Every structure is written in C-alpha cells, then in structure tokens.
Amino acid sequence: VSQRSLTAQLQSVLILSTVAVLLLAGSGSVAYEGAVMRESLRREMAVQADMIGANVSAALLFDDSHAAEEVLRIATDIPDLLKVEVLSAVGTVVATDKRQAPPDRLFEQLLRGLGVEMELSVQRPVVYNQKLEGSILLSWDLRPSLRSMAKQALVGLAILCGAVSVATLLGFRLQRRLISPILHLSSLAENVAQAKNYKLRATKFAEDEVGQLVDRFNEMLARIQERDSHLEKLVGDRTAELLKANEQLVHQAYFDGLTGLPNRHLFQDRVLQALSHAERVRKKVAVCFMDLDEFKHINDVFGHETGDKVLRQVASRVAGCLRDTDSVARIGGDEFMFLFTNLERPEAVGRIAEKILSAVQAPMHVDGQVFTVKASFGISIYPDDGSEPATLKKNADMAMYHAKAQGRNRYSFFTRSLDEQLARRLEIENNLLSALHEGQLAVYYQPQFDTEFHLVGFEALIRWRHPEKGMIPPGLFIPIAEQSGLITKIDEWVLQSVCRQLGEWRGKGYHPPAVSVNLSMKLFHQADLPERIARTVSDCGAKPSWIRFEVTESALMENAAQTVGHLSRIRELGFVLSIDDFGTGYSSLNYLKQFPVDHLKIDRGFVRDLASDKNDAAIVLAIISLAHSLGLSVVAEGVETEFQSQFLRGHGCDYLQGNLLGRPASAEVWEGLLLDRSDLPESGEA
Amino acid sequence: VCISKLLCDFEAAMKAMFCHALLCGLLGGCIASAWADENKNDAEVARIKAVYIYHFASFAEWPPERTLVPEKEVRLCAVGGGPTVGQLTQLDGRDLGNGRHLQVAQLRLDQVTKTCHMLFVGELPRADSDLAGGRLRGEPILLVGEQSGFAQNGGMIEMFLRDDKVRMRINLSMVRAAGIMLSSKLLRLAEIVEAP
C-alpha cells in the first residue's frame, strides 16, 4: 500500500511525465539534428571535395604536387576543415593541407572520453575523362557543430526546467481542484466517526467523479443514519421490555404469586428497615405471626383450588385491616407475618390483632360453600422481645403457638415465660410417645349419675404419671398431642383401654354402664374413622353400645359438614354420641338439628358459676330446654357443690358428673360401685 | 638521374654532379647500376612525356574553322627522333573523352601539313626545328617539343625535367596567335613564357 499522499503521487506523476516527454523529445530531436547535421555536412564536404577534385585533377594528371598544394591552399579556406589530402590513384599522398585544430574544451574531452566521434572524414574520387585519377580526402572538425548542439541541449534543459515548474504549479492547482474535495470528504468522515453524528453531509463542489463520490458518500451516511435510528429505537424497545421483565422478576422475587402480598424476602427487608428506623426514632415495632387454624383440613377435603381461594380472601381481608405503615406478608402455606411500626404502646397491637382475627373469621363464601376460618396470632415486640429479626420472628411464632394452645382463634403476646413453656412443651412432645409405650399413661374413670344418683356411666379421662415429674395434667399435654398428631394414637389407646376394661369388668361378672370416650377433632380428618373405631372395639371383644363418644362443640363446628357424615356413620354402627363442652362454641342451631347426637354436655364453666352468675344459670336453663326440645338428654359436668347438684336436678338436667359425686379414679376403685349395678340390665341407657 | 640533371640545368647539374661524384667516389660500386638506371629512366621519361602529350590533347581546343577530320579525331603528328617519338605511336587510337580519339602520325618535317592538330618535335637539328617553326607559324597546330628553349623559340609547349619530374613551359603568345585555347588547369601547371 502506498504511503505517499495523493498530492505527492499526482505531483510526481506530472513531473515525471513532463521530464520523460521532454527528455524523449529533446534527445530525439538532438539525435535527429545530429544525424541531419552529419548528413548535410557530409554532402557539403562531398561538394567541397568534388570542387577540389575538379581543380586538382590536372595536377594529378601531370603529377604536380606543388600545383595540387597550391590548389588546396586556395580552395581550402573553409571553416572547421581539419585536413585535406589529394591522393593518387594508387593511394599515395600527392598533396596535403592540415590545419591546427584548437584544443578540446572540457565538455569535448568528456565527449571524446565517451567515444563520441569528433571528426568527420569524406573521401571522394577524382575522375578525368571517365578515368579515376585519384581521390580527395577531407576531414572535418565536428566540435563546433557539437557545441551548437550542446547549446541547443542547454536551451532544451532550460525549457525542461520551465516545464517542470509549470507542471509543479499545475500539480498544485490540480491538488486544489481535485484533492481538496477529497480532503474535505475525508475530514467529514473523520468528524462523523468521532462525533457519531450521522446527520452530517458532505458538500459537493463539482459534478465530476469526486462529486459522484460525494453523492455516494452522502447516500451511505443517510443509510447509516436510518439504520442508526432504527437500531436506537430497537434498543429502546428492548430496554423497555427488559425493564418490564425485570420488574416482573422483582415482583416475583418479592411478592407472593397467589395472594399478591409481599413474600418472606420483601418482608425481611421491611423488617430490617423498620428496625433500623425504630432504633433511630426510639419507637416500638411489632413482628407478628398468624397461622390459620385447621387450614390443611380445607385443602384435604375441598381441594387446593378452594384452599387457594380461601387464602386469597383471607389475604385481602387482612390487608384491609392495615394502616399504610403496616405490612403483611404470606410466608408460605397458611402462614402470614405482620409488621407494625411506629408504635407508642405495644397494647395497640392487640386491638389490631383482634380486628384481623374477626375479619378473618367472618364467614366467607367460596365455591358455593360457607367457610369460617379462624387463626392464631402471635406478637413479639421490638425491642422488648428481641432486637434481631430472627429472634423477633421466632418469638412471634412461639406466641402464636401459645395462642393455639390457649384454644385458638386468639392472639397472644410473647412473654418470657413462653420461652419456658415452649421448652416444656418440647419436652412433653418428646416424652409423650415413650410415655405411651412405657405405660406411663393411664385411664381414669369419673362416674356419671342420674338425678336419683344411680350410676349411669363413666367418662374415661387420660392421666400421665411421669416417673420423675409426677402427674402431668391433660390440659397440658393433650393440646401438644393434638398439634403433634400424637392425639390419634392416644385416643386409640384410650379406646382400647376402655374396651379392655369393660371386657374385664364383664368377665368379672359386673354390669358396667357405658363409658364416654373423648374423640379429638384430629380423628375426624381420617376418612375411615367410623370403620377404624368399629374395628378397634370389636378387636377388644367389646360392643358399640358400651361406648359413648364425646366430641367438643368447637371441634364439631370447625368442620360441621364433614363431621356430620362421620357422626351419622358412627351412630349407625351403634355407638352413642354426645356434644362436649356445649355452650363454648358457636353452634349453629341448624347443624345442631342435623347432628346425630344423643346428649349435650354443659360446659363446666357455666356450672361453676351457677350460684353467682345469673346469666350462666339462664344459659344452663336454656341449654337444658333446647336439648330437651331437640329430644336430647343433658349432662352437666363439673358438679362440685350441693347447690349446683340441687339446681341442675331441679331444672331437669338428666345426668350429673363432678367431684361432688365422684372424682376420677382408676378402674379398680369403681368395682364396688359396680356391684350395686349387678342387678341392672346389661346395656344401660345412660 | 645524374645525366638528366646535366641535361636540364648546368648549375643544378653541377651541384648534382658534385653530389653524385662525391657519392660515387665514396661508393664506387654503385656506378654500374647508375648507368643501368639511366637507360631505364630514359624510357620512363619518354613514356611520361607521351602520356603528357596525350593529356595536352584533352586540354586544348582548336579554332572552329579547324574542323577535326575525320570527325572527332585529333591528329597528332610527330617529327624527329628520340625515345619519346617512339612512345607516341602507342597513343594511336586512344580515347580522349567526349567521343574524341587520338590519331598519331609519324612524319618527316616536310610532310607536316595543316591537317595536324598537334605536332611533336622530336630530336632534330636546331635549324630544322626553327624552320619548322617558321613555316608553320600562325597555323592552328599545337607545337610540342622537348628541346631546351623550344618554347622561347617559336614552340608552344616545352617539356623539361625538373626535380626528377617532367614539367611544362608554355609560350602563351604563340598559342593565342595560333587560335588554340588551352585549359586554365593546364596553364596553372606550366611556366608561362611570353615570346613572339
């Protein structure tokens, strides 16, 4: 690739061609003139020689060299003649005339050195009467001619110099005419490349080839500009799409897909922010945990789609209860977390929790069904209950479990004792299974009497005799067993124990009355519950009529629709059913009518305050009246005073149970009482 | 060589003689060969003279009334004796250029007529030669001779030896008087004598 500029190339081409043309023309003309000069010289010399020959012919004829020399002296006054010789026919010199040639000049020496001939010789015959008489030899000095030619060459050289200067000048003009538009184009291209400004256009100076180039260049720029703007638009569109996708991803990363609530990651962020802010402003923050009670049951029975719809409704209800500064997040399954900031007093959270719980538990219509969802709510307060998000969450979780253990559908603040309770609960949970297998559990029986104080039944109550801690009350470990799922095993064990005990008593010849066995709500989640019960009973050699199952009112109402089915089947198998703790739940009279039960059992809470609380007395009376109008018999438990006994018997309560009449005790204790019943028919209707 | 010098010019001959005598005296052996040279040289000079006479014919123009008879023949008459006359016969019929030929006739003096264009006078007694000159005076006949003083004494072209070469002496008055034109080329080579 040529490194030289176009200008230099053009210039050198012009100069070289000028020099070449002029040199060629000059040397050609010099050579031609030289040849012409030589030829004319030769002719002239021939003429001269012939003239001399004519004059000297007689001298030759008469062999007169003097005369010949005389002729030569006269005839040879010719410039530039070096030598003239008259030769005889046989070649001997007859006469000669030589001139002294001037010495060579410098350039002539040079030419002679180059082998250039400096003399021209011509020999002409001398003829007389058609006979050759001799010859004339002329030698001519060429140097003067060469000198004149050299002068000509010098003039030519001067012309050459002039032509070169003209060519140079022309070259500069050409450069201005031709190159400067190209340079303009080049500088424009550079500008475009540097500024990335494709709106620039080159100026056209002429309609020649460079002008065409400018047109093409501008067309190209227009294309690039078009392409550039197209690309810019494309990039803009793509960027917008990416931003949107990114937003979606961020949303997916920080929000729960099902409910649209923030997820655990976003919640974590918000907790951190809230804590650092609270630290600065010395305000309190509440981190709360909420878990729907028995939500798994909805999923199991009605399917996940329904469950999801319920969750969505819960989420929207919950969100509706919040202030702008509060947050709620779904952190998985049926678990929600709340963040309440800028709290002056922690007690305020309690009110919000109540509001949330009541919002959640309002009946909701989903897929043609009516659901009543309840939840447990745990609260932990920064900085009282912890300063780290993890601690606060853990404590809120603990508080929520406490709320669940308290009987659900309520909230609970974290307290230091909860920590200990949790530890105890964990211990119980760990020990309960081994207790079951190692015989630490025992069944106590509490008698039930009619108004005439005849024994009509027992209620089987579980007791845990811990080898180190002594008696552990059922109120402590039964909720834990329910939560851990152990309750199904415990209930089964109790049923087996009762059946065995009844078989044993009958084997001894006693006629024991029916025994009430509590059925945990958990058992009702088993689709084959009636069959399992029937199998367990028959395996022990017992009969369904010997057993009376008690189900708490709240458990029944929790999932009334399904429970009704199970209960009907159980009753068909021949078992007797009763509703336990009646009055504490929210019984729908409609369901109560449908429930295939035989007894209502008044909650011990109403019985306890009968004497002091007129309302309780009124409720008890109402329950008795209600039960009787539905054709059910009424059992009052927790009878501990004579007043209670009198009141209940006086107002139509059918059966009584309580420490006044008999404390729970092991089976052996009651064998004496059974003796009195030996005359009674086998399966007493209690 | 020495002899011819004696014949030509006394003074020069004496010098040459002196030289030759000196040379001969110093180198006696060369005398015999010198004589032989002399004989040979006589013949050579005669031959050269004959050639000169032939050339004279071509440098001369005769008056118009002196028509060449027969046509384009130049009649060369020779009288007297000597080697030159003997050589002249060889020129007979020679081409002279321009279509001319040379006709050579050897005559006695009294036989010479106006029909001759040229007359070569060989070795004759002096009186005869004068006579001849007197008798043919005014005739357009080119008189050529080789006797010393021939040109001064009524002859026209006299051939003589100088510096070993044959030279001419022309009596221009005589030539003019005879109405003959000689070429200036010839005249330039010759000594011109003006004598009646």
Image (cartoon, rainbow, N blue to C red):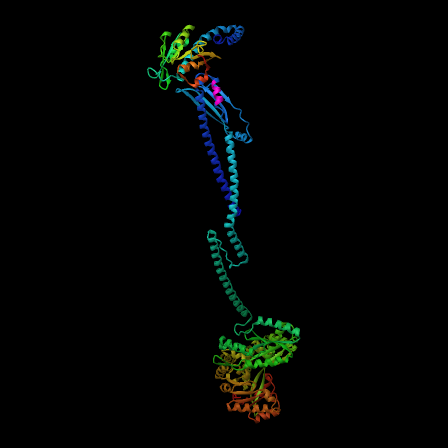
Q: Is residue A50 above or below residue B158?
A: below
Q: Nearer the viewer, residue B190 or A140?
A: B190
Which x, y percent locates residue B96? Answer: 38, 17
Give the side of residue A549 with respect to residue A611, left or right.
left
Residue at 48% across, 36% down: A27
User: Which of A515 and A130 lies nearest the eye of the viewer?
Assistant: A130
Q: Is residue A98 above or below residue A427?
A: above
Tell me the magenta residue range.
Answer: A67-74
Q: Is residue A71 magenta?
A: yes
Instruction: Give the x, y percent position of residue A519.
Output: 54, 81
Magenta region, mostly helix, strand or loop? helix
The question of residue A627 being in magenta is answered with: no
Query: Does the image show residue A151?
Result: yes
Q: Toward which corner of the image does residue A505 lie, by quadrant?
A: bottom right
Q: Where is A422 relative to A110, above or below? A: below
Image location of residue A536, percent across then percent down: 52, 79
Q: Does B68 appear above or below A216? A: above
Q: Identify which residue, A435 or A331, lies in the foreground.
A: A331
- One can see residue A292 in this view: no
Residue at the limit of the structure toward the left, as seen here: B70
Single out the residue that lies furthest toward the bottom: A650
Q: Quadrant of residue B155?
A: top left
Q: Position of residue A280 (x, y in %)?
A: 66, 73
Total numbered badges shown on the rendered structure: 0
> Which residue is nearer to you in this view: A248 or A634?
A248
